[in-house]
């Protein structure tokens, strides 16, 4: 599963993702050391502290879990934040059908 997560991270880092529903232009990639990633990581932690059973795709998390102060950043920044949280053991990714869902790691989940 971690290989799939890393592959997804590489793909989203190589290509900008367009948020067409909001009519935005293609967004730039994100540096893993970017302070934006810290903001996103904190936002995801805060969201999951209020909604501990929530699960969503990177697109859903990017669009609904993060209260952007201005225009949303690149979706690759959200992917980078999720991978960071996964390495910390806070979230996990699960393939469900043809989608990858992210959720908080529960106390009963084996890491």
Image (cartoon, rainbow, N blue to C red):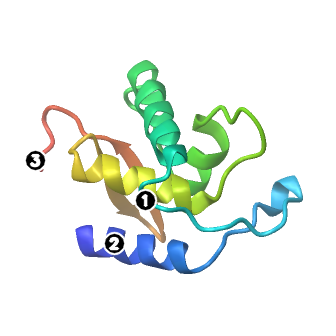
On residue 32, the disc is 1
- Mark 3 or mark 1, which has the lower sequence index? 1
* Image side of residue 24 versus residue 30, left or right: right
- The spot of residue 45 in percent (x, y) is 40, 31
SS under mark 1: loop
The residue indicated by pointer 2 is: 6
Of residues 104 and 43, which is closer to you in this image? 43
Label 1 crowd bin: few (<14), some (14–19), many (20+), radius 10 Å: some
- Mark 2 or mark 3, which has the lower sequence index? 2
Label 2 crowd bin: few (<14), some (14–19), many (20+), radius 10 Å: some
On residue 18, the disc is none
**The N terminus, quarter of image:** bottom left
State the count of labels: 3
Of residues 89 and 13, which is closer to you in this image? 13
- The spot of residue 41 in percent (x, y) is 44, 40
SS under mark 2: helix
Q: Is residue 57 visible?
A: no
User: In the image, what residue occupies the spot 48% across and 71% down?
Assistant: 98
The residue indicated by pointer 3 is: 110
Image depth: mark 2 or mark 3 in front:
2
In whole angstroms, how far apart are the C-alphas of marks 1 and 2? 13 Å
Which residue of the protein is positioned furthest toward the right in this rendering? 23
* Image side of residue 100 versus residue 20, left or right: left
- The spot of residue 29 in percent (x, y) is 59, 68
User: In the image, what residue occupies the spot 25% across and 40% down?
Assistant: 105
User: In the image, what residue occupies the spot 13% across and 35% down?
Assistant: 108
User: In the image, what residue occupies the spot 23% across and 53% down?
Assistant: 87
The answer to which image quadrant residue 26 occupies is bottom right
The answer to which image quadrant residue 33 occupies is bottom left
In whole angstroms, how far apart are the C-alphas of marks 3 and 1? 27 Å
- The spot of residue 58 in percent (x, y) is 53, 55
- Residues tagged 3 and 1 counted as in contact (Cβ below 8 A): no
């Amino acid at each position: 599963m971690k290989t799939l997560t890393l592959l997804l991270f590489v793909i989203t880092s190589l290509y900008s993702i367009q948020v067409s529903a909001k009519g935005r232009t293609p967004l730039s990639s994100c540096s893993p050391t970017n302070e934006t990633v810290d903001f996103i990581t904190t936002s995801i932690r805060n969201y999951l502290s209020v909604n501990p059973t929530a699960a969503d795709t990177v697109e859903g998390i990017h669009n609904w879990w993060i209260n952007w102060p201005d225009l949303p950043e690149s979706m690759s920044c959200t992917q980078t934040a999720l991978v960071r949280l996964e390495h910390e053991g806070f979230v996990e990714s699960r393939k469900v059908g043809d989608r990858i869902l992210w959720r908080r790691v529960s106390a009963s989940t084996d890491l």
